[in-house]
Image (cartoon, helix red, strand yellow):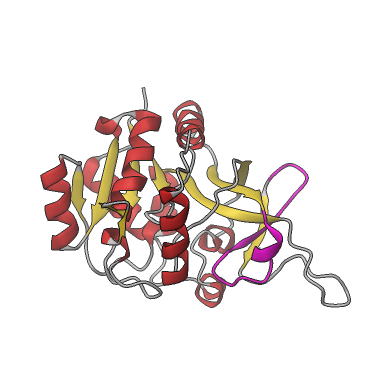
Amino acid sequence: MSIGAVIIPVRMASTRLPGKPMAEINGKPLLWHVWERCTNAVGDERVVVAGCDDEVKEFCQQEGIKYTCTSRSCLTGTDRVAEAVDLLNLDFAVNVQGDEPLLEAADVRHVFERMQADQSVVLNCYSDLRSDEVLDPSVPKVAISLSGRLLYMSRGGIPYDKHISANALYKQVCIYGFSSNHLKIFKSVLGKTPVESVEDIEILRFLELDVGVQMIQVTPTPIAVDTQQDLEKARRLMSDGFVSK
């Protein structure tokens, strides 16, 4: 039986929203809400927070949340997950970004079960895009093949037509599945790859290294928290009683 875990990579020095993991929503940090949904999916013994900040470490210890300390030099969440997989001696990881407080536990469970059964491909998730998100640079847009493979991902409204009009249909949902071997490939380069660096989208590193990515369609999430405005929207939604499944 392959050994895996859901890993939530976090850091306090977020570029767009400093201190994001500990930002309060309904009396609890953002990180706690993500962790709770992941534990609803696979149980708390298989959910690990990976970070490098004392504040996050202390909170996890107080709450009984499994935590592994990773280096401050990690360039992306996936680099942090790769380090955690090595430290924990895992065969695979489901990476859930720490900014998705309203994701569906059922989607995390589905990706985890897919990885348990087959670790031959990298997995990432996508969902339908709302019209107000088409030109939002904080929302990565997804172009996929007819077989569901990732063709490209961009902060622009891809695909564009010949009149340079955005025709984006799908957005990324930050749930990933990686084998330990895929993560070794990911961290085999020094620094970010060229297109990854331009777009600031880490999954593109796999495409640049000729590693295919299979996309899984999941439930649209109403918000991923990247900015202060996103945080305020998440607070309103959750105060109004939004509940994930």
Residue 170 x %, y %: 68, 54
Q: Which of 33 and 156 is in front in this view?
A: 33
Give the residues drawn in magenta, as a range. Answer: 129-148
On screen, residue 89 above or below 132: above
Q: In this view, does 67 lie to the left or right of 32?
A: left
Q: In this view, does 116 lie to the left or right of 212?
A: left
Residue 136 falls inside the magenta stretch: yes
Q: In this view, does 139 lie to the left or right of 116?
A: right
Residue displayed at 47% across by 28% down:
113
Q: Nearer the viewer, residue 65 or 69?
A: 65
Residue at the limit of the structure toward the front, as seen here: 240
Q: In which quarter of the image is residue 21?
A: bottom left
Q: Is residue 55 left or right of residue 155?
A: left
Residue 63 x %, y %: 16, 43
Residue displayed at 47% across by 52% down:
237
On screen, residue 98 above or below 62: below
